[in-house]
Image (spheres, helix red, strand yellow):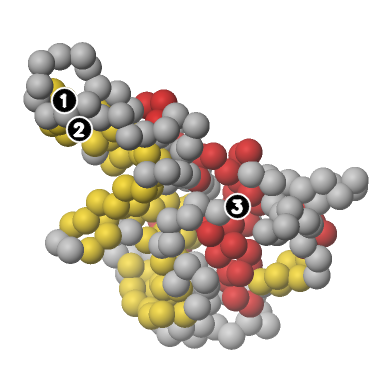
Amino acid sequence: IISYKEQDDNKLFPVQGSEAKINLISDDVFDGIDPQDEREWRVTVLKNGAIYWRGFVLPDDSSEPFSTKPFPVSISATDILGTFKDVPFTDANQLNFRGEVTKLALLSYLLSKTDLGLDIAIADNTFEAQMLRTPNTLDCPWPQVLYSYDRYYDTEKRPLSCYEILRSILAEKSCTIKQVNGKWWVVNQEENNRLLTAIPYRVYNKDGVYQSHSQLGEY
């Protein structure tokens, strides 16, 4: 069972993390989950041979009853987005970034912190006047927006959290993000609610490299 925590309260909430509840029948003691390591076990759910959902097991939410074998085992897993509130925005050496970054590269870096390696689909077709803007092709506004890294550090050079930054770049244009069918989907909800036809989207790999484009119906 896949559930979206924030979506239950507000479908327009920018960051919509998800969890999976997995129920198994075991004929042995299930003691392989280290309660101190939230990324020891990665879960991949397949549907028709393709990735449907991916996350990491939550040790504290996984349990098995004391009963006669075979017995049921309950496992919970998360896609990590909700834990971003505790992750500071620094590089691999725990240093602050310097210079500038595109919105797409920033999104790709933030999502790399999940260690899930999923593609990124962006359905956002609101372009500024100076941008390349052929909405039905590979042109996308996100690689054309440039930010200074300075905006993500306070006056004492302390970094914001990855969650705060992810939420801010999504909220700028009423976008939401959630994992659907094995991809991170970024959707401009104003367009989604306004347009009667399908919305053009582009797919990038986990590193932000263009892969393909198409049109979005329901997702």
Q: Are marks 1 and 2 in contact (CB under 8 Å)?
A: yes
* 1 and 3 marks in contact (CB < 8 Å): no
Q: Secondary structure at mark 2?
A: strand
Toward the viewer: 11 or 107?
107
Q: Amino acid at mark 1?
A: Pro
Q: Earlier in the sequence, mark 1 or mark 3?
A: 1
Give the total number of marks visible in the rendering: 3
Q: Is residue 148 above or below residue 171?
A: below
Neighbor class of circle 2 (other Cα within 10 Å; few <14, some 14-19, many 20+) is: some
- Report which quarter residue 212 is drawn in: bottom left
| Left or right: where 131 falls relative to 10 | right
Q: Which mark is in front, 1 or 3?
A: 1
Q: Any mark on residue 166, and which? A: 3
Give the labeled residue for mark 1.
72
Q: Residues within 10 Å of mark 3 (few under 14, many from 20)?
A: many
Q: Residue at x 38, y 53 (%)?
A: 179
What amino acid does circle 3 point to?
A: Leu
Pick whichever of labels 1 and 2 is earlier in the sequence. Answer: 2
Q: CA distance from mark 1 to mark 2?
A: 7 Å
Gap in Å between the C-alphas at discs 1 and 3?
Answer: 37 Å
Residue 48: percent from left, percent from top: 14, 61
Q: Disc 2 designates what residue?
A: 23
Q: Residue at 54% of width from left, 83% of height from top?
A: 133
